[in-house]
Image: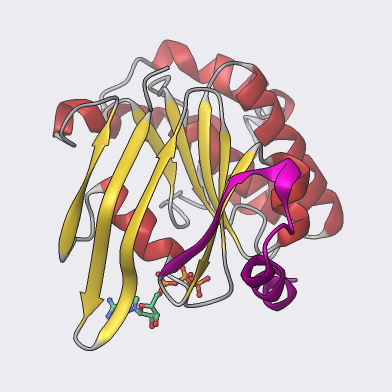
């Protein structure tokens, strides 16, 4: 099966800081792939390079076997940070604006709103949404152009337990709909609950990589997992 994402020796240095050091891994279709690591381990920098917003110092990667051109990136949806939503506009209006900016059909809006379970709140102002609802709207926006891959950076950060549970269920639902998902997390528990495969990063280095059911195998992994727990 051809890899959705293939990374070879990807490296990013910020001056003397080796944020990502010779990272090599593959993500296959249908996987929910977790990048697990404590703060500063290089997760966000890696996702930034994959999205084309951070220039690699070295190494390479392909999406669907192709160079990461603009055309290829259209198949990838991402929630990298909080997107700009207008507080006094409704969820629906905000998505209409996003659809216009991304040049995707507005016809997809009801579908994504239903998926993230915000149809009944679509006409309410964004500012009245809970943090969990805001995150679900961000995910809806990332899905507007029906991407093949969804990238999420710490999707449950700052949410209350109910919001966390809802986002985790949503991730599983999106995966069950056939999308490949790549997410960064510093929570082992989260990766165990939602991911099928994972990579553990420590100070920019890959220290473990494989299916989630192998969590904890290998001495160094145990050590790193103890840190991220
Ligand atoms: P967090 O969970 O805190 O976001 P992370 O695992 O995503 O952590 P990165 O944000 O990728 O880690 O950071 C990796 C390292 O690179 C850290 O030491 C960080 O300070 C450094 N770094 C990241 N971005 C920059 C930048 N623009 N300039 C300088 N150093 C940076």
User: Which x, y percent locates residue 119?
Assistant: 68, 23
In the rendered view, would you say 198 is above or below 178? Answer: below
User: Which x, y percent locates residue 5?
Assistant: 35, 35
Q: Is residue 8 magenta?
A: no
- Tell me what residue is drawn at x 32 percent, y 20 percent: 104
For the magenta stretch, what is the residue range? Answer: 205-229
Q: Is residue 67 visible?
A: yes
Q: Is residue 215 magenta?
A: yes
User: For residue 120, what is the image quadrant?
Assistant: top right
Q: Residue furthest front?
A: 218
In the rendered view, would you say 114 is above or below 54? Answer: above
Specify whether 226 is left or right of 52.
right
User: Which x, y percent locates residue 1?
Assistant: 43, 17
Question: Which of these two is toward me, 58 or 218?
Answer: 218
- Tell me what residue is drawn at x 51 percent, y 28 percent: 180
- Tell me what residue is drawn at x 23 percent, y 89 percent: 16
User: Which x, y percent locates residue 115?
Assistant: 65, 22
């Amino acid at each position: 099966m051809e890899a959705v994402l293939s990374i070879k020796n990807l490296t990013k240095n910020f001056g003397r800081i080796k944020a990502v050091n010779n990272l090599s891994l593959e993500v296959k279709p249908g996987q929910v792939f977790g990048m697990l690591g404590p703060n500063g381990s290089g997760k966000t920098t890696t996702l930034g390079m994959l999205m084309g917003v951070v220039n690699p110092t070295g190494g390479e990667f392909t999406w669907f076997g192709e160079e990461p051109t603009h055309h290829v990136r259209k198949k990838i949806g991402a929630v990298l940070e909080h997107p700009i939503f207008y507080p006094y506009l409704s969820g629906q209006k905000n998505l209409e604006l996003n659809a216009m900016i991304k040049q995707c059909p507005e016809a997809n809006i009801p579908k994504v709103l239903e998926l993230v379970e915000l149809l009944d709140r679509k006409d309410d102002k964004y500012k009245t949404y809970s943090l969990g609802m805001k995150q679900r709207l961000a995910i809806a926006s990332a899905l507007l152009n029906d991407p093949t891959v969804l990238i999420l950076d710490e999707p449950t950060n700052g949410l209350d337990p109910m919001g966390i549970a809802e986002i985790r269920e949503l991730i599983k639902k999106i995966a069950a709909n056939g999308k490949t998902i790549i997410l960064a997390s510093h929570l082992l528990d989260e990766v165990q609950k939602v991911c099928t495969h994972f990579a553990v990063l420590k100070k920019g280095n890959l220290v473990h990589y494989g299916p989630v059911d192998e969590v904890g195998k290998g001495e160094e992994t145990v050590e790193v997992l103890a840190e991220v727990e």
